[in-house]
Amino acid sequence: MADTTSRLTSLKARITELADMAGRDREGEARGLAAELFTDLDRLMAERPARPDPHADKPSQAPRAPRDDVERCPVCSLRSFNFQKGSIRESADGGFEAFYRCGSCAHEGWREIK
């Protein structure tokens, strides 16, 4: 990682140098340096490890609305914990969650969709 940082710092300095050259009628030198910089950037991009796609293992499935739009509220115990339409998100463990709001005590929370 330190090697990458020093290489990128050097690349930034050379880009600054290129900008200075372009302003002083040194177009040929600027084009040569630009070609070197593109080569260096291409090499760095090729050396960079590919990041794995976090969704590659999962089958693509669209989230579905919960089976029950109304559940028992965990706070007031009344059956008034209502699913809020359009509030489905992907959970940290790979499933989906839906947002509920209690019509009685106003408690809000996310519930796993089963």
Image (cartoon, rainbow, N blue to C red):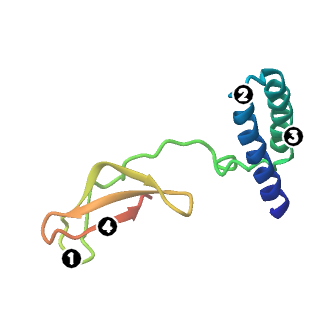
At label 2, which amino acid type do we have?
Arg
Front residue of this view, candidates 38 and 113: 38
Image quarter hosting the C terminus: bottom left
Q: Real-space Cα distance between discs 4 and 3?
A: 48 Å
Helix, strand or loop at label 2? It is loop
Q: Are marks 2 and 3 in contact (CB under 8 Å)?
A: no
Point 42% across, 46% down: residue:
64
Q: Residue furthest front?
A: 24
Q: Amino acid at mark 1?
A: Ser
| Three-letter amino acid code of the residue under disc 3 | Arg
- What residue did someone put label 4 on? 109
Which mark is first along the chain, 3 or 2? Answer: 2
Relative to 49, is 103 on the left or the right?
left
Q: Mark 4, mark 2: which one is toward the viewer?
A: 2
Q: CA distance from mark 2 to mark 1?
A: 77 Å
Q: Could you give the CA–CA distance between mark 2 and mark 3, rounded to whole angstroms?
A: 29 Å
Relative placement, left or right, of 104 versus 100 is left
Give the SS element for disc 1: loop
